[in-house]
Amino acid sequence: MKKKIDFSNFITEDLAESLVISQELQELSIIQKKAIIKAVLYVISADGIITNEEKNFFAQLLKGLSINNELLKEAVDLEDEEMFKVLQSVNKEDFLISLLNQAAMIDNNLALEEEMFIATIMEYIPQGKKPRDFYNKILTF
């Protein structure tokens, strides 16, 4: 059974002001933004701990992408297979990896699980499909 995620505290106005959203991010389609949001959630959840720095980074990213709670729910519900396929269409792969690394390093601690998730993304995005044994979870915060 899938655990329900409480979205009420994902988006907070006071945290979301300092992340500079690049032109690349703003030009993405809604589905691409959802896929990126889900990938970032996987990164910050990978080590089983979401730090305050990661929460702040995520809130800033949501604000910069103009993602509301409804779109956030849709991003979380996006099938993993679809996420990998859509991320392939974000053809600025180095930009995507840079964003995921930024999310992983925002708390000055690159956990092995975060590093492994990013490596998986780098390996499978060009193929546009998810790994057969892919299973990650998204934590609530």
Image (tube, rainbow, N blue to C red):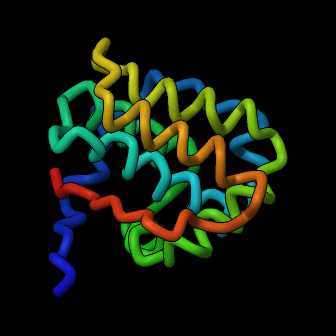
Q: Residue farthest to the front?
A: 133
Q: Residue farthest to the bottom?
A: 1
**Residue 84's image quarter?**
bottom right
How many badges with numbers are in the image?
0
The answer to whether 91 is drawn above or below residue 21 in the figure is: below
Give the left or right position of residue 29, taking residue 35 as reference.
right
**Residue 26's image quarter?**
top right
* Residue under the point 68% across and 57% down: 87
Residue 106 point in image, percent of width and height: 37, 21
* Residue under the point 49% across and 75% down: 78
* Residue under the point 65% across and 54% down: 124
Residue 17 point in image, percent of width and height: 43, 28
Quadrant where the N terminus lies?
A: bottom left
Give the left or right position of residue 66, taking residue 30 as reference.
left
Residue 30 can be seen in this image: no
Residue 29 point in image, percent of width and height: 74, 62
The answer to whether 113 is drawn above or below residue 140 in the figure is: above
**Residue 44's image quarter?**
top left
Residue 22 point in image, percent of width and height: 70, 31
Give the left or right position of residue 87, taking residue 121 as reference.
right
Residue 93 can be seen in this image: yes
* Residue under the point 29% across and 32% down: 54
The answer to whether 70 is drawn above or below residue 68 in the figure is: below
